[in-house]
Amino acid sequence: MFDTFVLYALPFSFTLLVACALTSLVSGLVLLLFRLRKTNEVLRHPYLKQHPWERYPLSIRATILLDYFLRLCFPKSKFWIAGQANLLLAHIQPTEVSTRIKWPLIGFWGGCFVGLIAMLLLWGLILLTMNP
């Protein structure tokens, strides 16, 4: 029974991992090449009032984009980093943000998080099927 499960789960988790990687890559490229300026104008992160986008290091830029994602996907959360993002971006109504702004953010970060889960599942299945 376990062999049958692994027979289907192993290729599925690999396919999901590849799909998530491609989704994150395409969404990230569209976001960074074409939609970044418009996204920052529409969502107006409070950090951008202090300094322009270009002056921040990559880690803070990624944090700003993660805050946008968390506000758009979990608007009622008060827990942990999603709660902090909702406090910082309380002026944003996720239902009023256009899909043109939302999809690159959700595709990028959603692909990253689902891809991490798929990668852990793939590693776990590979370790379980290895012969000692």
Image (cartoon, rainbow, N blue to C red):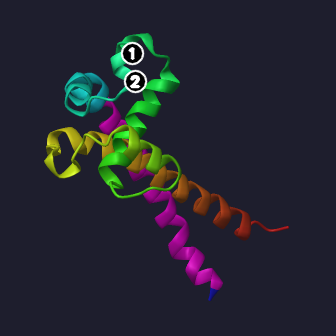
Does the image show residue 15? yes
42 vs 111, nearest the viewer? 42
**Is residue 6 found inside the magenta-colored segment of the image?**
yes
Looking at the image, is 113 positioned above or below residue 13?
Answer: above
Query: At 52% from the left edge and 26% from the top edge, which residue is drawn?
Result: 59
Which label number is shown at residue 47?
A: 2
Which label number is shown at residue 107?
A: none
Query: Contact (CB < 8 A) between labels 2 and 1?
Result: yes
Query: At 50% from the left edge and 56% from the top edge, which residue is drawn?
Result: 79
Looking at the image, is 66 positioned above or below residue 59?
Answer: below
Residue 110: percent from the left, percent from the top? 39, 50
Residue 55: quarter of image: top left
Q: Which residues are magenta?
A: 2-29
Q: Secondary structure at mark 1?
A: helix
Looking at the image, is 58 positioned above or below residue 5?
Answer: above
Q: Which residue is mark 1?
A: 50
Residue 102: percent from the left, percent from the top? 23, 43
Q: Residues within 10 Å of mark 1 (few under 14, many from 20)?
A: few
